[in-house]
Image (spheres, rainbow, N blue to C red):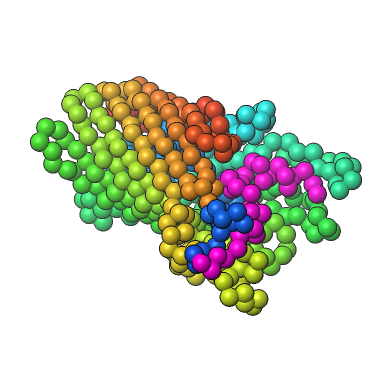
Amino acid sequence: MKKILIYTILCLSFLAQDIQAQSQCQFNTSTGQFEALDGSPCVNTLITALPFLRIIPDARSAALGDAGIGLSADPNAVFFNASKLTSAENNLGLSLTYTPWLRSLGLNDVYMAYLSGYKKLDDDLSAIGFGLKFFNLGQINFTDANGESLGQGNPNEFELTGSYSRKLSEKLSVGISLKFIFSNLAAGQAINNVEITPATAGAADLSLTYITPVELENMDSELTIGAAITNIGTRVSYTNSVNQDFLPANLGIGAGWKLKLDQYNELTFLTDFNKLLVPTPCVGADCEQGGDPNIIDYKEQSVISSIFNSFSDAPNGIGEEFREINYSLGIEYWYDQQFAVRTGYYAEDATKGNRKYFTLGLGIKYNIFGLNFSYLIPTNSQRSPLDNTLRFSLLFDFAEASDN
C-alpha cells in the first residue's frame, strides 16, 4: 500500500481511536448495550471525508478552546457563524492565519493557511464575506507495493467560501454561505488498478445570531447566542466508486456573555457545543442486535436523510447520541481593547475520539493592526497534530484607518 494512504490518515483524520476497534464490539443482552470485548464502552467514532473542513482556522478561537460561534465578530466569523458579521464593529476587515501542522513529528512542509474578510453594506443591515482555506500536505514520495518509486507529489486541499448575512431585526440576523471544495491527495496514482482522482464538492452553511443587552447593576453586558449548520453538501470519492463518503456536516450552538467591567477592562465567557450531522457507523459482527444480515449500509442514505437520522441512529441509543456532542469553554480578557489574554478547554468523549486539551493565547491590537497567538496543551495521552504548536493570525481594520 502506498505511503500516501498512511500519510493521509496521520495528517487529516480527526479519529483519535483505532477505527478497527469498532468491529470488536458485541451486544450485551444483560445491559442492552454494545460493549467492547473487555466490557468497556464501545469505541464508535464518526467517520467523514475531508475532515480539514472542521479544523479551526484562526488563532483567536483556537486560544479559546475552539469556541467561536458566540464570539464578537471579526473576519473569521465566515468559518464559525457568518450571520454575526452584521454586528462587527467596523465596516471592513481582513484576517490571515498560518497554522503549522505535525511539527512534533519533525515535518516542516505541512501547514494550513486561512484568508478571510468581510464588508458591511446597506447602513450595516447586511454584510458579505469570503474565506479561503488552503491545506498543504508537503511533498510525498509515492511507492508501489514493492517499494519501487512512482515519483513525487504535493497533495493539497482548499475550500473557497462566499457568505451573505442580513439583520432581520435590531437583535436577530441570519446568514448563508456557499462553498467550493477541492481535495487532491494522490491524483494520477492508482491502487489495485483503480485510478485516484481529485475529489470536489459543493456545500452550504446556514446560521443565525441573536444579540441582546443584559442589565446588570454595576456594569454593561451583552449576550450573544448563535447557531450554525455547516458543510451541508455533496458526498465525495477519490475514485469512480459508487461508495462515497459524507462531508463533515455539523450543528454548532454557542453563546458568549461579554461584561464591561469598567472603562478599560472587558471579560467574555464563551461556550460552544458541536455535533456532526453524519451517520453513526454500525458496530458488532453483524451491526445490529437481531443479527439481520440484510442491513442497509449507512452510506446509502441521502445527505438530507442522514442529517435527520444523525440524531437517532447511534447503536447505543440516546446516551451515545449525547456522547457525540463536543464542547468548548473559553474566557477572553481585554484591557483597553489593546491587549487580550485568552484561555480555553476542549473535550470530546473517549468513545468518539477522546480529544481533550487546554489552550492559551494572547492578542494585541494597535490602530488598524491586530495580532493573535494561540498554543495547545493536550491533557491526555491522545496526540494532536497541533501538540505544543504556536499558531498566529494577523488582522487588519481598513475602515478604521480611513476614519483617522
Q: Position of residue 234 (x, y in %)?
A: 56, 62
With 335 as the anchor, is 150 left or right in this view?
right
Nearer to the camera, 403 or 197: 197
Nearer to the camera, 20 or 25: 25
Q: Position of residue 287 (x, y in %)?
A: 61, 68
With 222 as the anchor, is 275 left or right in this view?
right
Question: Which quadrant of the structure image shows residue 289?
Answer: bottom right
Compared to residue 367, the image places residue 64 above or below, namely: below
The answer to whether any part of residue 89 appears in the image is no
Q: Position of residue 45 (x, y in %)?
A: 56, 54
Q: Position of residue 354 (x, y in %)?
A: 52, 45
Residue at screen point 55% across, 53% down: 40
- Find out whether residue 6 is within the magenta segment: yes
Question: Which quadrant of the structure image shows residue 137?
Answer: top right
The answer to whether any part of residue 25 appears in the image is yes
Residue at screen point 41% across, 46% down: 327
Nearer to the camera, 145 or 84: 145
Magenta span covers which residues?
1-30
- Find out whether residue 175 is within the magenta segment: no
